[in-house]
Image: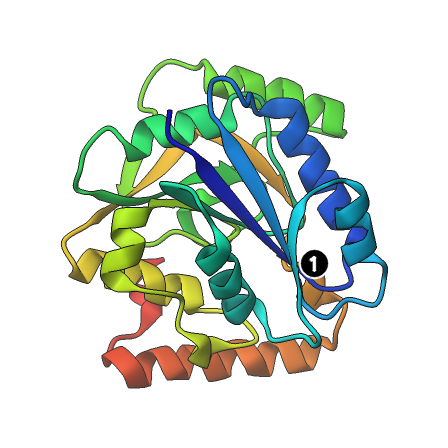
Amino acid sequence: MKLTSIVIPTYNGLDLVQQAVASIRSYTSQQDTPYEIIVVDNGSTDGTSGWCLQEQLAFISLPRNTGFPAACNKGLRFARGDCLMLLNNDVTVSHGWLAALLQALNSDGKIGIVGPVTNYASGKQQVDYPFHSMNEFHRVAKEVLTQSGEQVQPVHRLVGFCMLFGRTLYERIGELDERFSPGHYEDDDYCFRARMSGYSLLMCRNVFVHHQGSASFKRGDSMELQRLVEQNRQRFIDKWQVDPGIFI
């Protein structure tokens, strides 16, 4: 059975990565969907590396914060899996999430990247499923997983909070572009490159995960964040001569 490598970059977010790992362990079956977790500690000073060691997690400890794309790339180089997952540290997964994403990814050789829906994202992946606690979230997510009707939807773009792709795609189009460090639009760029290489993208409407949303960036200055977003949007335009806004 194929192994999935789940790469989680983190920077001074021990509480977040603890929740993310706990949800993976609670809602993912090693027997049905074998996986490994790789935490990339981006120069944290909050004890993340020590906790990973205590929990017997594979981890990479970096001396400084290299940004999201570079941390993802380091994790992907370390990964052993046939399938590769980039997961934000502020995501809580739900019952059956990985099996459903893998089913969508493996349903057709032309599918390059798949992703779930969530409560917080830009674009089509954000859905309005009401819940008022994490217990309610998990109840709703379980209902969504078994709902009838359209379960997957072709899209032009997937947000990088939870992206699953095969090693074949990774070996063909390469790593995340680190010119977008410390983050934003590296996921748009990766999706664009996948589509240019003939792959399609699928949004899995039956997989609902919880996303706090830009948790690491929110801890910084909001004006600086806005400048970064605009700067990286321009970098995308300069690289491809296309405004990424048309894919949202």
Which image quarter: residue 9?
Answer: bottom right
Q: Residue furthest left?
A: 198
The residue at the point 57 percent across, 21 percent down is: 95
218 or 71, nearer to the observer: 71
At label 1, counting other C-alpha atoms closer than 10 Å, the crowd grade (few under 14, some 14-19, many 20 or more) is: some
Vertical placement of residue 238 versus 77, above or below:
below
The answer to whether residue 103 is left or right of residue 147 is left
Q: Residue furthest right?
A: 46
Residue 165 x %, y %: 35, 45
The residue at the point 75 percent across, 48 percent down is: 52
Which image quarter: residue 80?
Answer: top left
The answer to whether residue 81 is left or right of residue 69 is left
Residue 178 x %, y %: 45, 76
Residue 75 x %, y %: 52, 58
Name the kind of residue labelled 1 in the image.
Answer: Ala
The residue at the point 47 percent across, 24 percent down is: 33
The residue at the point 77 percent across, 66 percent down is: 44
Vertical placement of residue 181 versus 171, above or below:
below
The answer to whether residue 21 is left or right of residue 31 is right
Quadrant location, the N terminus: top left
44 or 136, nearer to the observer: 44
Residue 69 x %, y %: 50, 68
Which element is circle 1 on? helix
Quadrant location, the C terminus: bottom left
> In this figure, which residue is indicated by the disc labeled 1?
215
The answer to whether residue 153 is left or right of residue 16 is left
**Is residue 204 among what the camera can see?**
yes
